[in-house]
Image (spheres, rainbow, N blue to C red):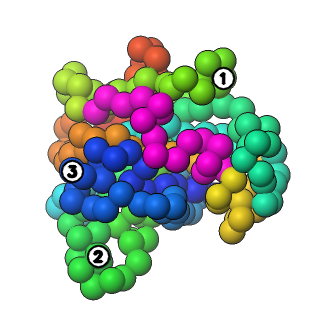
Amino acid sequence: MKILCVGRNYIEHARELNNPVPKTPMLFMKPATALLNQGKPFFYPDFSTDIHYELEIVLRISANGKHIEKEFAPKYYDQVALGIDFTARDIQSQLKEKGHPWEIAKAFDHSAVVSPFVGLPVDHANGIPFELRKNGQVVQSGNTADMIFSFDDLIAYSSKFFKLQQGDYFFTGTPAGVGPVQVGDVLEGYLLGAKLLHCEVK
């Protein structure tokens, strides 16, 4: 399985990092070794001193497909989860300054936290609200209605370049409010008001 991700898919998040709003989806990938699920803790890596959380809606790809037209995209995902795209922001900044790829800042082991999956809300086209709480305080609050590129846009665009396969995961972007974590922090994700994700930083 592979983990597809999109960067800067919420305007306010792009602005908070002083990044331009993209014209097309900014895709990147994480390897299977990045996956952290089943409520396991995240151990702060020794190569960074500035790890940031980024809460996202994650799609589960339900069928194989290539060159998928947008109108048929809904047939290729069937469940959603909450995910945290952990980012070594200090390393990412260094890489961006040099024009180098971001993989070691974004795709390191256990950098992709994923909650249990649930059925896709029937009215998901109207937006799915979600939020992240750090130590009990709300730090991110978003709604998929505010995405620059919709789920269907992402499926259609990414399938031009990569064959989507059943069991792949797709991180669909984070809203504004990203920030650092420290050892001892507890992160909790809520989908439609229900707690779905729990991750302790150790």
Do the residues under discs 3 and 2 have CB atoms within 8 angstroms? no
Instruction: Name the residue: 21% across, 50% down.
Output: 16
Task: Kindly identify the amino acid type of the residue bearing the numbered disc 3.
Answer: Glu
Q: Is label 1 or label 2 in front?
A: 2
Let me know if residue 105 is in the magenta part. no
Magenta span: 140-155
Figure quadrant of the N terminus: bottom right
Mark 1 → mark 2, Cα distance in angstroms: 37 Å
Q: Is residue 172 left or right of residue 66?
A: left
Secondary structure found at label 2: helix
- Out of 167 and 36, give the one closest to the viewer: 167
Instruction: Name the residue: 64% across, 25% down.
Output: 120
Give the image location of residue 11, x and y in percent.
Answer: 34, 47
The residue singled out by tag 1 in the image is 119
Do the residues under discs 1 and 2 have CB atoms within 8 angstroms? no
**Can the viewer see residue 22?**
yes
Q: Is residue 121 left or right of residue 200?
A: right
Let me know if residue 141 is in the magenta part. yes
The residue singled out by tag 2 in the image is 96
Mark 1 → mark 3, Cα distance in angstroms: 32 Å
